[in-house]
Amino acid sequence: MSAIDLNARPSADFNAKLAETAAVLQQAARDYAATTAGGVSRVTQASSLGAEDVVLSHLINALQLDIGIFVLDTGMLHAETLALLAQLQATSRAPVTVYTPVQESVVQFVAQEGVDAMYKSIALRKSCCHIRKMEPLARALAGKDAWITGLRREQSGARAEVPLLDTTDAARVKINPLANWTWGDVWHFIAIHHVAYNPLHDQFFPSIGCAPCTRAVSAGEDFRAGRWWWEDEAAKECGLHAKQTSLIERTPA
Ligand code: SF4
């Protein structure tokens, strides 16, 4: 049974949510349009190629918005995720930029701590996330005044208060156009618009990150139970969506 068969159950007010999401994206494109002729938009979509992200990229393309998309290729992604990235790059109207870690940092970290360092301690796991995600993220967001994410309130307790517009970071606004969507809404959209998605979702991976740090979940498990499953629930953010004012400060904690 596919993820669509299992999950595509829209909310009664799905159409209103979709209209809200489209309006938020259109407003973002206007608010953060390039300030100079030939310049680049000051808003960008962060995509991990998960179900929410492919919905947002599809909308950005369908609405023909001047919003670029970026992906962090940590060097640890599943083959299925890399194949979806190649497909997005080949088909997206919006430009897709891939950011990779500084190779010298990766080589040094792996030589010192081992390729399985993330399992040894939370500190080492966060160091790995810093090198492979946070430093590239800082480059991806440099010069941007806003970024678009696929965060939803339903995803976890830590995300239960996610607003449509998060202005708590002085550096840039975080826009969460799917904050109100359910998992059923996401899959309904994917189904009716025939959006390409990561086939790992069909293997009970609701949340997909790096291969060593993602596993399938069982029926009844929390949405993000398959991410860093060996850690306490409270530690389960890689830093990308932590609530601190500085991008760099929020990293390894
Ligand atoms: S999710 Fe895992 S493999 Fe990926 S950067 Fe973080 S610790 Fe490293």
Image (spheres, rainbow, N blue to C red):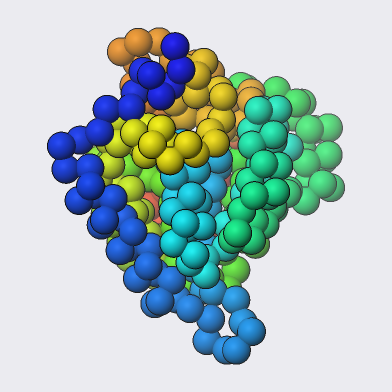
Is residue 47 or residue 188 the one in the foreground?
Answer: 188
| Foreground of the two, 8 or 219 | 8
Residue occupying the point 40% across, 10% down: 218
- Residue 69 in which image quadrant: bottom right
**Relative horizontal placement of residue 94, taking residue 202 as reference (left or right):** right
Of residues 215 and 33, the one drawn nearer to the viewer in this rendering: 33
Residue most extreme to the bottom: 36
- 92 vs 171, left or right, is right
Q: Say above or below: 46 vs 228.
A: below
Find residue 120 and report its horizontal and vertical position in percent: 62, 22
Quarter-of-image position of residue 140: bottom right
* Residue appearing at x 60%, y 76% in the figure: 40
Residue 8 occupies which quadrant of the picture?
top left
Residue sitting at 50 percent across and 24 percent down?
Answer: 201
Disc tally is: 0
Tell me if residue 170 comes above or below residue 138 in the rendering. Answer: below
Which quarter of the figure is the N terminus placed in?
top left
Q: Is residue 69 visible?
A: yes
Q: Is residue 234 above or below residue 18?
A: above
Residue 16 is situated, as x and y percent measured from the top left of the image, at 20, 51
Quadrant for ligand 1 reads: top right
Q: Is residue 250 visible?
A: no
At 57% from the left and 89% from the top, the residue drawn is 36
Furthest residue in direction left, as rendered: 12
Q: Give the percent coordinates (x, y) of residue 68.
A: 57, 63
Tell me: 93 left or right of 2: right
Q: Position of residue 73 (x, y in %)?
A: 68, 43
Instruction: Check the image and report above or below for 38 versus 85.
Output: below
